[in-house]
């Protein structure tokens, strides 16, 4: 469910050169065409969809490198919100 | 840039730009998108000059474009960006931007100096033992 939502958001905001459906979870989104600016839009859309805010420590290239890395970040932040 | 601001509004501008940058850009509503685009390009060009690692976390607002009274702009570093500059051995940054309705571009020239050199921001240079060198990076963006 979360993975599907993330894929949908990447497809809408990532401006990739290929369809998200063609990428496995560990594929590099940067190699698929994700730019620095698109990653900002992607970040804001993810925050909006999941009701989270990426802290500064997560504002790094690695966080948005793949579907899997985004999923892991969202999982961590939503668990933190749930625990709070 | 126009589309991003339309979609995300203040969340977008407040996450990327300092209060000073927003005040300048928003002073002219018609030209705000191209001004923001130029500043985004400047932040990207500066960051690339630092040669960050994939695990380096940088708040875009820690790289600030400051408008000078005479009309030129320069780069002001804060917090994490200062640490990256020091690690890279960068002692000075020079910025040139250009923008029109549809495109914006920024070029940053970074001066690298030997260990112990003083910098424009707090603390001495940590990094390189290389002789003085310059790096130039450019980024262009759709306004």
Image (cartoon, coloured by chain):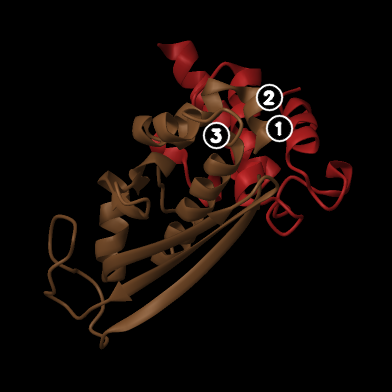
Chain colours: A red, B brown
Residue that sits furthest to the front in the current view? B70
Q: Nearer the viewer, residue B38 or A84?
A: B38
Q: Nearer the viewer, residue A62 or B68?
A: B68
Answer yes or no: are tags 3 and 2 on the same subunit.
no
Label 2 residue SS: helix
Which quadrant of the rendered structure holds the C terminus of chain A? Answer: top left
**Residue B61 at x, y percent in the picture:** 39, 40
Q: What is the quadrant of residue B3 in the picture?
A: top right
Could you give the CA–CA distance between mark 1 and mark 2, rounded to whole angstroms? Answer: 6 Å
Q: Disc 3 is attached to a residue of which chain?
A: A
Q: Which residue is mark 2?
A: B7
| Image position of A3 with respect to B138: above or below | above
Q: Disc 1 is attached to a residue of which chain?
A: B
Disc number lying in front (3 or 2): 2
Could you give the CA–CA distance between mark 3 and mark 2, rounded to whole angstroms? Answer: 23 Å
Disc number lying in front (1 or 3): 1
Q: Residue at x 48, y 35 (%)?
A: B25
Q: What is the quadrant of residue A44 in the picture?
A: top right
In the rendered view, does A2 fall on the left or right side of B20? right
Q: Which residue is mark 1?
A: B3
Neighbours of disc 3 within 10 Å: few (<14), some (14-19), many (20+): some
Q: Residue at x 49, y 47 (%)?
A: B39
The total of numbered circles placed on residues is 3
Label 3 residue SS: helix
Viewer can see residue A58: yes
Number of the label disc, if any, that sits on residue A73: 3
Neighbours of disc 1 within 10 Å: few (<14), some (14-19), many (20+): few
Label 1 residue SS: helix
Circle 1/circle 2 CB separation < 8 Å? yes
């Amino acid at each position: 469910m979360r993975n599907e939502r993330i894929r949908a958001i990447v497809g809408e905001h990532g401006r990739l050169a290929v369809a998200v459906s063609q990428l496995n979870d560990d594929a590099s989104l940067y190699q698929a065409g994700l730019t620095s600016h698109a990653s900002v839009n992607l970040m804001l859309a993810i925050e909006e969809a999941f009701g989270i805010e990426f802290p500064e420590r997560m504002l790094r290239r690695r966080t948005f490198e793949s579907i899997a890395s985004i999923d892991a970040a969202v999982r961590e932040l939503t668990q933190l919100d749930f625990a709070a | 840039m126009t589309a991003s601001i339309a979609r995300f509004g203040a969340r977008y501008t407040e996450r990327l730009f300092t209060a000073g940058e927003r005040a300048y850009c928003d002073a002219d509503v018609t030209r705000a998108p191209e001004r923001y685009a130029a500043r985004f390009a400047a932040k990207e060009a500066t960051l690339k000059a630092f040669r960050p690692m994939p695990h380096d976390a940088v708040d875009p607002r820690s790289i600030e474009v400051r408008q000078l009274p005479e009309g030129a702009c320069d780069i002001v570093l804060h917090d994490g960006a200062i640490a990256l500059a020091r690690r890279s051995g960068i002692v000075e940054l020079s910025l040139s931007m250009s923008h029109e309705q549809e495109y914006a571009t920024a070029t940053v020239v970074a001066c690298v100096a030997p260990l112990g050199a003083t910098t424009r921001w707090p603390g001495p240079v940590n990094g390189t033992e290389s002789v003085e060198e310059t790096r130039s990076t450019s980024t262009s963006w759709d306004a």
